[in-house]
């Protein structure tokens, strides 16, 4: 990206919105810094279109890298994986254009945070599928990166997308509301489905979306179940059976020994957060069923306590409070936990406090798969001295989202060890068939050489060449 393009942007836009970089901004993961020429703080869709058209005039010599709030912590934050880019910061596109409580949708822009949208829905019969990350993160940005909420993977929340393509034209795909009509909220339409086509892609700039609002259940409660590490394989197989039989309503979350210590829970135990919800009679019946299943497990499990019990020992536990509220779409505890974990606020995470890296593979929902994952953790600890922590999230009765975290001091030697551990995570888990579903900036898809990505790459590259022949949009983490 030439400096003259930055100058051109200053001429055509409000110069106060254009920032030239001497150095690429830091990130909490301490990833290698690419060459970034500058940033535009976008405040309108018209600006996005104008910038894309200006880039088009440069005959492919420019590369635009859009992001929403930039809080993609642990995977690179605002950093692109490629050099010579100009960032487009879209958090100025922060309008909630519409909320329809009756039909169950909202129309939002990339700068709308999950906290803002959550608060708009409090005391209504609708709520959103929030993640356990900061309330200040972008709902749309995370959904486009296929993040996981407390109810399901956020790809399920996307109904329609508004996109600026490389030729500067604005398009809408998927389901959008039509005045005077009440149609079914069905994102696929007729023919090829394009909504998911634009997730994890650099095929356009997303400027808006229709997202699904969930029905608020009549009653909800969370079962806290603890067990010791030696019973991990048994516990996972048991939870898989419970999930297959409909005893879990949402994403089951299991914090391991290392992650529970990070967040301040009991040493030497795994702690499970198991949600159930629905009509009061259904929740009552499920509660009895779960208690019966718990008794069947005998000494394999240590304890079962309900979130609404007067004897709940986790009433002052910040993780338990966060998760219980998040199952209901409430983000009031999110940034309290974040500050406790990293010692700073969302706006300062990338510049101060501890370092944080994430590795996010998908595993089969089986005790054997989890056992293999923890053997890999042990090997990595022996090699690097880095102990990986993990949260086990269940996406269905077949899939586990394993959120592996590495927290470290931001000193040269500790940074080196953390990134060596990350490299080994990619190598060992991929060798076992446990591939990541989200990527960091130092391990983009272009570096992956498994058979599946090689087969799909040819198709994606062909489509990318058609939609962006000049390479106006920078290579992203998921570019082939």
Image (cartoon, grey):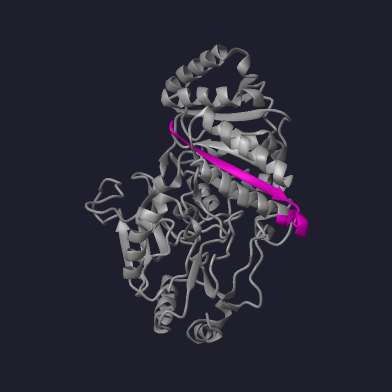
Nearest the eye: 120 or 351: 351
Q: Position of residue 339 (x, y in %)?
A: 70, 49
- Where residue 225 appears, x then y in whole percent? 60, 24
Q: Nearer the viewer, residue 87 or 462?
A: 462
The structure residue drawn at horizontal position 32% and vertical position 62%, both measured from the top left corner, is 172
Where's residue 30, x and y in %?
67, 60
For the residue pair 321 and 379, the one nearer the viewer reads as 379
Q: Is residue 21 above or below residue 221?
A: below
Q: Tell me where residue 69 sits by quadrant.
A: bottom right
Q: Is residue 268 shown above or below 174?
A: above
Region of the chain picked out in magenta, as a range = 397-416
Q: Residue 88 at what x, y percent from top left? A: 51, 70
In this orientation, does residue 279 appear?
A: no
Looking at the image, residue 139 sits to the left or right of residue 457; the answer is right
Q: Residue at x 51, y 62 (%)?
A: 68
| Residue 466 as seen in the image, left or right of residue 4 | left
> Is residue 415 one of those drawn in magenta?
yes
Residue ID at (50%, 42%): 434
13 or 296, which is in the foreground? 296
Is residue 126 depicted above or below 145 in this figure?
Answer: above
Total marks shown come to 0
**Which quadrant would the C terminus be assigned to in this image?**
bottom left
- At a point 54% along the width and 27% down the height, the residue shown is 236
Give left or right: position of 409 versus 302: right
- Residue 326 visible to an observer of this rendering: yes
């Amino acid at each position: 990206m030439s400096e003259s393009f930055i100058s051109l942007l200053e001429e055509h836009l409000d110069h106060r919105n254009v920032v030239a970089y001497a150095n690429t901004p830091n990130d909490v993961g301490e990833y290698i810094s690419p060459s970034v020429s500058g940033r535009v703080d976008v405040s309108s869709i018209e600006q996005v279109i104008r910038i894309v058209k200006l880039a088009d005039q440069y005959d492919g010599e420019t590369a635009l890298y859009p992001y929403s709030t930039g809080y993609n912590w642990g995977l690179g934050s605002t950093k692109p994986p490629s050099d010579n880019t100009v960032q487009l910061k879209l958090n100025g596109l922060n309008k909630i254009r519409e909320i329809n409580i009756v039909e169950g949708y909202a129309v939002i822009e990339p700068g709308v945070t999950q906290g803002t949208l959550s608060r708009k829905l409090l005391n209504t019969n609708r709520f959103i599928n929030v993640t356990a990350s900061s309330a200040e993160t972008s709902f749309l940005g995370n959904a486009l990166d296929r993040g996981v909420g407390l109810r399901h993977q956020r790809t399920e929340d996307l109904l329609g997308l508004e996109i600026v393509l490389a030729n500067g034209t604005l398009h809408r795909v998927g389901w959008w509301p039509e005045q005077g009509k009440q149609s079914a909220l069905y994102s696929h339409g007729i023919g090829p489905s394009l909504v998911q086509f634009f997730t994890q892609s650099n095929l356009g700039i997303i400027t808006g979306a229709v997202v699904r609002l969930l029905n608020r259940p009549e009653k909800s409660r969370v079962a806290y179940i603890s067990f010791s590490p030696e019973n991990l394989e048994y516990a996972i197989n048991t939870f898989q059976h419970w999930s297959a039989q409909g005893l879990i309503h949402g994403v089951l979350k299991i914090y391991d020994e290392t992650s529970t210590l990070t967040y301040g829970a009991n040493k030497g135990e795994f702690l499970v957060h198991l949600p159930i919800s629905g009509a009061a009679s259904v929740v009552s019946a499920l509660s009895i069923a779960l208690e019966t299943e718990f008794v069947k497990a005998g000494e394999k499990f240590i304890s079962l306590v309900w979130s609404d019990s007067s004897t709940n020992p986790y009433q002052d536990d910040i993780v338990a409070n966060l998760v219980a509220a998040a199952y209901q779409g409430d983000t009031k505890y999110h940034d309290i936990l974040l500050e406790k974990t990293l010692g700073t606020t969302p706006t300062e995470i990338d510049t101060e406090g501890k370092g944080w890296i994430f590795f996010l593979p998908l595993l089969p929902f089986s005790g054997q798969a989890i056992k293999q994952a923890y053997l890999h953790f042990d090997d990595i600890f022996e090699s690097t001295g880095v102990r990986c922590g993990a949260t086990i999230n269940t996406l269905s009765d077949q899939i586990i989202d394993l959120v592996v975290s590495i927290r470290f001091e931001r000193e040269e030697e500790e940074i080196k060890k953390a990134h060596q551990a990350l490299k080994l995570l990619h190598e060992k888990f991929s060798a076992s068939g446990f591939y990541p579903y989200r990527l960091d900036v130092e391990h983009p898809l272009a570096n992956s050489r498994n058979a599946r990505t090689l087969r799909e790459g040819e198709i994606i590259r062909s489509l990318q060449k058609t939609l962006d022949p000049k390479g106006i949009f920078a290579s992203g983490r998921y570019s082939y």
